[in-house]
Image (spheres, grey):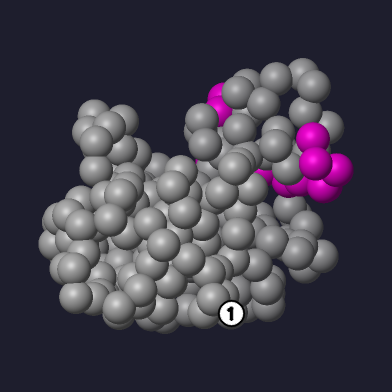
Amino acid sequence: MGCGRVGSTLAHSLETAGHSVAVVDQDAGAFRRLGTSFAGRQITGVGFDRDTLVEAGIEEADAFAAVSSGDNSNIISARVARETFGVENVVARIYDPKRAEVYTRLGIPTVATVRWTADEMLRRLLPEGAHSVWSDPTGHVLLAEMPFASGWVGRSVPKVEEHTGTRIAFITRYGDALLPTPETALQDGDVLHVLVKRGEVPRVTEVFAADPATGDAA
């Protein structure tokens, strides 16, 4: 639902991946973004209107994405898709991060556009330090790419987690992703991807930037 830049890009990506796609927008002129190569259905109507959704094939749909420019329209249509038609995979784009948190608690996965965009901008503006590569819909938990001082090399993952208060999700080593075990130790050149609370990022970054205390066990 929504044939703006995000909706049209998403529609083409899904179609290229071999899926059947229907796009709903109340502005018929918006479908020009799809171009002549798009083979899916183009339905003019309100995205949370039941008859419009049925015409688009909602009763046979495996997934529904609400990506119009309005938070209210997106969440209403997402709830109709989930609660009325039983679509299993539903996601709504929300501009207001506070609303995104509320709707996520109601069981509707959301993408908080403003928070995600801000994180991506910061990642490119501030190349040094931790880089956020993922955030949960509420923005409270981050998956961050975390540089570390050389003194951490040789330390076991459980000890690193205990000392820093983070959870190491995975390690990139020689270009390959590695799921750490209790026996995994950090090596020179590793790229750490850690789960951390947003408010803890400055503290954790500072901890990783300094060598651990000499007396800490490896």
Q: Give x and y (percent) for residue 209.
A: 20, 51
Vertical arrangement, residue 153 with respect to residue 157, above or below: above
Label 1 residue SS: helix
Judge whether residue 148 can be spotted in this image.
yes
Q: Give x and y (percent) for residue 154.
A: 41, 62
Furthest toward the front, the residue is 215
Asked which quadrant contains residue 142, the reply is bottom left
> Label 1 crowding class (10 Å Cα cut-off): few <14, some 14-19, many 20+?
few
Q: Give x and y (percent) for residue 55.
A: 75, 55
Q: Is residue 12 left or right of residue 74?
A: right
Q: Is residue 125 left or right of residue 183?
A: left
Is residue 178 covered in magenta? no
Three-letter code for the amino acid on which mark 1 is drawn: Glu
Residue at 14% over, 62% down: 203
Residue at 51% over, 30% down: 5
Vertical arrangement, residue 164 with respect to residue 56, above or below: below
What is the count of numbered marks?
A: 1
Which of the two residues, 22 or 103, is positioned nearer the viewer here? 103
Which of the two residues, 63 or 36, is positioned nearer the viewer here? 63
Residue at 78% over, 57% down: 57
Q: Quadrant of the C terminus?
A: bottom left
Vertical arrangement, residue 65 with respect to residue 126, above or below: below
Q: Give x and y (percent) for residue 102.
A: 31, 74
Q: Which residue is mark 1?
A: 83
Residue at 56% over, 28% down: 30
Q: Is residue 128 left or right of residue 58?
A: left
Region of the chain picked out in magenta, as a range: 16-30
Q: Is residue 184 left or right of residue 144?
A: right
Which of the two residues, 207 or 217, is positioned nearer the viewer here? 217
